[in-house]
Image (tube, rainbow, N blue to C red):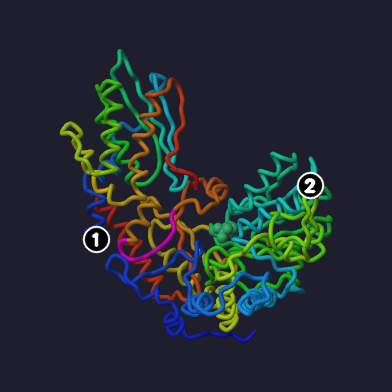
Amino acid sequence: MASPEPVLAELYREILLDHYRSPRNRGTLDGRATHRSEGANPLCGDELVLELAVETGRVTEVAFLGRGCAISQASASMMTIYLRDRTAAEALEAVWCFQQLMLSGTALPEEFGDIEALAGVAKFPVRVKCASLAWKTLEQALSSDGVATVSTDEGS
Amino acid sequence: MARRTYDIEAIRRDFPILAREVNGHPLVYLDNAATSQRPVQVMAQITRFYRDSNANIHRGVHTLSQEATELYEGVREQVRAFINAPSAREVIFTRNTTESINFVAHAWGRKHLRAGDEVVLSEIEHHSNIVPWQLLRDERGIVLRFIPMLDDGTLDLVAARVLITERTRLLSVTQMSNALGTIVPVKELAALAHARGALVLVDGAQSVPHLPVDVQDLGIDLLAFSAHKMLGPTGVGVLWGRMAVLESMQPFLGGGDMILTVSLERSTWNDIPHRFEAGTPNIGGVVGFGAALNYLSRLGMAAVREHEIELVDYALRRLGDIPGVTLFGPPDARQRGGVVSFDLQDVHPHDLGQVLDGEGIAIRAGHHCAQPVMQRLGLTATARASFYLYNRASEVDALVRGVESATRFFEHARG
Ligand SMILES: Cc1ncc(COP(=O)(O)O)c(C=O)c1O
């Protein structure tokens, strides 16, 4: 095959494409969710529904549904793996760390694992909001009770 | 009509940007529905204006002001000729299509529309021909009706006959969909609307740059379009209106140039078109637009149209042969403008756009400011390649190679 441009290989790391193709924790919690939030980037057509079950302050279950680009979906998939057994406070801290990664390329702590593969996105400003959608949706889910909607598009 | 063609390589030399590289590849610019490129003639005209003739218009006895006024007003006449309007006084310069449509909603709509009056639009409109009417609906209680879109991206003309009634005050439709390329039979719809006593506003943002448009032949009342999609500079738009319709409007913006006299109590309005051009307009931009109109007229819009039909026909066939590609819009190139909207299985349009950009190919990915069209298709986004007079078949080939390599890239990842 025509080899992908090196610059693209940096954006679409193998591990990211793997999450896109085989998303983890895809589905719903069938009524077990304590937190649910919907996010969208209308401009690019990314959509996400995130559900969390939080018991005694810890995330016990997490699931997402959505459609969108490889970056947005892979980011959501990776995030759900990270979230299992985290406290709500840790999850919100992670949102902050992820934003720093996108804003200034600040390296992530070890425990983020595969999520580091999204570091390449920071060099593609228009894709940052794709990668950030899941995390903003998470923040919204945890900072409100019940259903919330978030959009990372600033106007159109 | 005899088929006319032109020398595409000579034309491309007029557009220096087409010779640049993007990400190490020759630029393949296929986002013309968003904005076109500008030829050196337009850039030279703008430079010449600021270098030799710059002054404010309509307000000085000095030579420069008179020169600037003549240049500016000369373009008004060029626009008239380009769309075959009866009078140059019917041509109003705005910032873009969006402003032209909002202009009608304010200056005509607020004066004439009352609760219960109906405005008929279509499901394939650009947001700029939906939102102004929704704002007016919320303010005035008018009723909006939408001519439905059929599966092939054309409008349901049978439904249109039922939707356009004696209650319809305005039909406002696009002549060419920017999302699907569909060409709308505006002449037929206008006759229908006029038979019911409604006025007809046409969104010509896509049609005027790509088709011969004759407002008298179409029998419409108002036409909106943008210079930047037809080789001209950004920040210049046109609203053409039949004089009787313009005369029935209230001013849109108030200020300098649009008045005859002002006292602290009241003002009297200047003549049309100046009544509707408050404040200093984009003089340099309008003058540059004149060079764009010259350029298009020299080629001839019929030749531009034939060139695009050929390209789109080729693109539809080549893209249609790629496994996993779904094409949207009318299957016949003669029923559509230079726009090809498509979906690639398992590759999101945004990812496709990114891979293509890596190969120097500029397309648009997203909802194209036509979310109702996307909803109707059950999608959130499509990939869109849009052509113009300087594109050539080899660029379609580059696009096809790019789409194929995107498929392999994302497939490879799977295996
Ligand atoms: C059909 C149609 N209408 C309206 C517009 C708005 O044009 P502008 O952004 O120049 O106001 C566009 C531009 O994308 C268009 O394609």
Q: What residue span does the magenta drawing correspond to?
A: B358-365
Mark 1 neighbour density, 10 Å: few (under 14) some (14–19) many (20 or more): few
Which residue is pictured at 35% across the width and 42% down the height? A72
Q: Quickly name the residue at label 1.
A: A5
Residue B125, given in percent of the width and then of the height, sits at: 61, 54
- Residue B270 is left or right of residue A134, and the answer is right
Q: Quadrant of residue B13?
A: bottom left
Check residue B113 in the rendering and tell me which mark sits there, or answer none.
2
Tell me the kind of residue under disc 1.
Glu
Give the letter of the chain under mark 1: A
Q: Is residue A76 left or right of residue B275?
A: left
Within the magenta stretch, is there residue B62? no
Above or below residue B363? Residue B209 is: below
In the displayed structure, B85 sits above or below A9; it is below
Percent across and percent down for residue A23 are 30, 38
What secondary structure is found at the residue carrying circle 2?
Answer: loop
Q: Nearer the viewer, residue A24 or A134?
A: A134
Q: Is residue B171 above or below residue B257?
A: above
